[in-house]
Amino acid sequence: MGYVEDLREVVGQRPVILCGSCGVLVDPTGRILLQQRNEPAKRWGLVGGLMELGESTEAVLVREAQEECGIALDPAAFELLGVYSGDHLSTAPNGDQFYGVTVAYAVRGVTQQPRLADAESLRFGWFAPDDLPANMVARYRRVIEDYHARG
């Protein structure tokens, strides 16, 4: 079991604060890698996930990119975009409630092609920042907007 599963054994479905990170992975042409998630709503989002005990936010993104899409990332290439928190209470499909704290990074020049590496993903796609899918996780859309606004 991981940290979140262990925590849920103690607190049940009550609201908790969960920390994680995500990455705006950008190819040399400026397109952003998105992952269609294997969830009931089948939303698109950025590569990322939740922190395990003892991990840095950079290590979370490195691990999640490898686990979710088979891409190896170098934290030296990460540019901090921002920390996103407190916007709303989320409820997972299983009823677990949480407030998320997400540390977002930009990673430019990604040339590796994603592959389905676990059951969390349905597919991957590269998208222009001004042509994103309509069915996106709201927080991730905001991260991309912030990335795009930085130029």
Image (spheres, grey):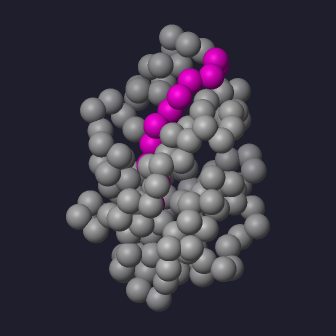
Tell me the residue at 48%/24% (across/down).
5
Q: Is residue 19 magenta?
A: yes
| Image location of residue 44, percent across then percent down | 65, 60
| Image location of residue 47, percent across then percent down | 49, 58
Tell me the residue at 68%/38% (across/down).
88
* Figure check: 86 above or below 62: above
Foreground pick, 142 / 58? 142
Classify the position of the N terminus by image quarter. top left
Foreground pick, 57 / 146? 146
Tell me the residue at 30%/48% (across/down).
59
Q: Is residue 53 visible to us here?
A: yes
* Figure check: 36 above or below 12: below
**Which secondary structure dominates the residues rendered in magenta?**
strand
Q: Is residue 43 magenta?
A: no
| Image location of residue 148, percent across then percent down | 56, 74
Toward the front, the furthest residue is 150
Tell me the residue at 38%/75% (across/down).
108
Task: Give the magenta part as a residue range.
Answer: 13-23
Residue 130 left/right relative to 63: right
Q: How many marks?
A: 0
Q: Is residue 124 visible to us here?
A: no
| Image location of residue 113, percent across then percent down | 42, 75
Toward the top, the furthest residue is 10
Foreground pick, 135 / 42? 135
* Figure check: 16 above or below 148: above
Residue 79 left/right relative to 129: left
Toward the bottom, the furthest residue is 29
Residue 36 left/right relative to 9: right
